[in-house]
């Protein structure tokens, strides 16, 4: 039986009353006209290169926050509920990863329960700089993008340092303020209709 909510949500950042540790990241998303150049810069600073994968993210209709079923060619399927403000520049995202052993059945049930809002298909390359993930994305119907995600334990003490890391990497990767996007691929697809 699938348990969607390992803990209870409250307003603001996610807090859990039981179940796994809270997870958070500081992230940015930016348009990237030259993915090959971005890849070369990422390779020069990466501490490890995770590789490429195909991802299909099915976003469900929600009253607040976002809920997606991610099907990855590399990592299998996960249900990901998250809260993140739509704003430019580095922003905090609070989330949980729930492994989904039967994605087809889970997709069918959630489609019936909540309805599907959008489906995002992408090719993603992933590099790491310490705890920060660099995503080089080709998103079907939208173009090419670069994301940074500094993963941390959701504590306020760690958040300041993670923001510094993201700022530093933005500079190293040549990401300008004008390139930053304030929303999700899901919302961007909706705008193209």
Image (tube, rainbow, N blue to C red):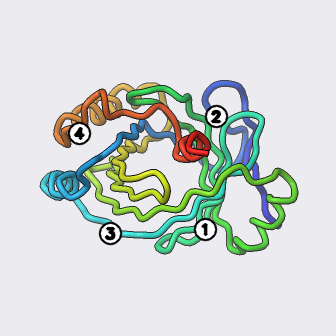
Q: Which mark is residue 14?
A: 2
- Which circle's residue, 1 or 3, is located before the other in the chain? 3
Separation of residues labelled 3 and 4 (CA atoms): 19 Å
Number of numbered discs on residues: 4
Label whose residue precedes the other's in the sequence (2 or 3): 2
Residue ID at (27%, 35%): 165
Q: Which residue is mark 4?
A: 169
Task: Classify mark 2: helix, strand or loop.
Answer: loop
Q: Are marks 1 and 2 in contact (CB under 8 Å)?
A: no
Residue corresponding to mark 1? 77
Dot 4 or dot 2: first in sequence order is 2
Q: What SS does tag 3 mark?
A: strand
User: Residue, x 38% and y 42% (percent of image)?
Assistant: 150
Instruction: Residue 48 in the image: state x and y as whole percent.
Output: 24, 62
Residue lying at 39% horizontally and 59% vertically, measured from the top left: 138
Cα–Cα span, label 4 and label 1: 29 Å
């Amino acid at each position: 039986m699938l348990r969607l909510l390992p803990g209870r949500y409250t307003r603001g950042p996610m807090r859990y009353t039981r179940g796994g540790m809270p997870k958070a990241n500081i992230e940015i998303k930016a348009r990237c006209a030259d993915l090959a150049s971005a890849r070369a810069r990422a390779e020069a600073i990466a501490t490890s290169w995770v590789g490429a994968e195909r991802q299909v993210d099915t976003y469900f209709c929600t009253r607040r926050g976002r809920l997606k079923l991610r099907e990855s060619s590399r990592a299998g399927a996960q249900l990901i509920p998250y809260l993140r403000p739509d704003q430019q520049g580095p922003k905090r995202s609070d989330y949980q990863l729930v492994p989904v052993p039967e994605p087809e059945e889970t997709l069918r049930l959630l489609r019936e329960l909540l309805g599907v809002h959008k489906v995002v298909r992408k090719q993603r390359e992933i590099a790491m700089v310490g705890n920060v993930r660099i995503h080089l994305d080709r998103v079907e119907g939208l173009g090419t993008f670069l994301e940074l995600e500094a993963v941390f334990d959701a504590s306020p003490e760690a958040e300041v340092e993670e923001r510094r890391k993201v700022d530093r990497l933005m500079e190293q990767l040549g990401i300008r303020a004008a390139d930053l996007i304030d929303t999700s691929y899901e919302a961007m697809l909706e705008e193209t209709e």
